[in-house]
Amino acid sequence: MILGYARVSTGGQNLEAQVEALEAAGAERIYSEKISGSQLDRPELDCLLDQLRPGDVVVVAKYDRLSRSLQDLLIIVEAIRNRGAGFRSLAEDIDTTTPAGRLVFHVMSSIAQFELERIAERTKEGLAAVHKRGRVM
């Protein structure tokens, strides 16, 4: 079964374009909500994940609709994979149900992890430089 997920951050935004794209992609059921992606408690996303069965595919119009951060996206996609389901993002043409799609997603994941580690290194270097000058953060 193809399950769609649509999200906008505020009540003033419209879900219509996302819903239309998900329907065109064959989504049989669409979970939608108006809530910030940074919120950890997203009831419709939780419901979608609870309903997943092996062989299902979660489809989003754009991957940033599923998550605000790449780290969070990786965690959610891993949860989808652990349930035996796949993930598709229409705008980015990512499809983890295919070998090429899994490769693209893993490369993207590796780059994201690398960037997180570089940010941590730069932060430590900056704090060390400030400390060396006698300042306390």
Image (cartoon, grey):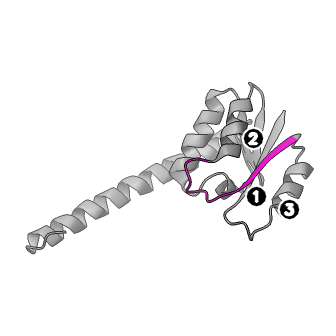
Q: Which numbered disc covers residue 129?
A: none
Distance from disc 3 to disc 2, alpha carbons, whole Å, reads: 18 Å
Residue 38 covered by magenta stretch: yes
Q: Which label lies toward us, 3 or 2?
A: 3
Quadrant of the rendering where the N terminus is positioned: top right
Q: Which numbered disc covers residue 16?
A: 3
Which image quadrant is residue 98 in? top right
Tag 1, which secondary structure?
loop
Distance from disc 1 to disc 3, alpha carbons, whole Å, reads: 16 Å
Which stretch appears magenta? 29-41
How crowded pointer 1 is (Cα within 10 Å; few <14, some 14-19, many 20+) is rated as few
Q: Which label lies toward us, 1 or 3?
A: 3
Please give the residue where the numbered disc 2 appears in the rendered image. Answer: 58
**Residue 54, above or below 15:** above
Nearer the observer, 106 or 127 = 127
**Residue 85, above or below 32:** above
Residue type marked 2: Val
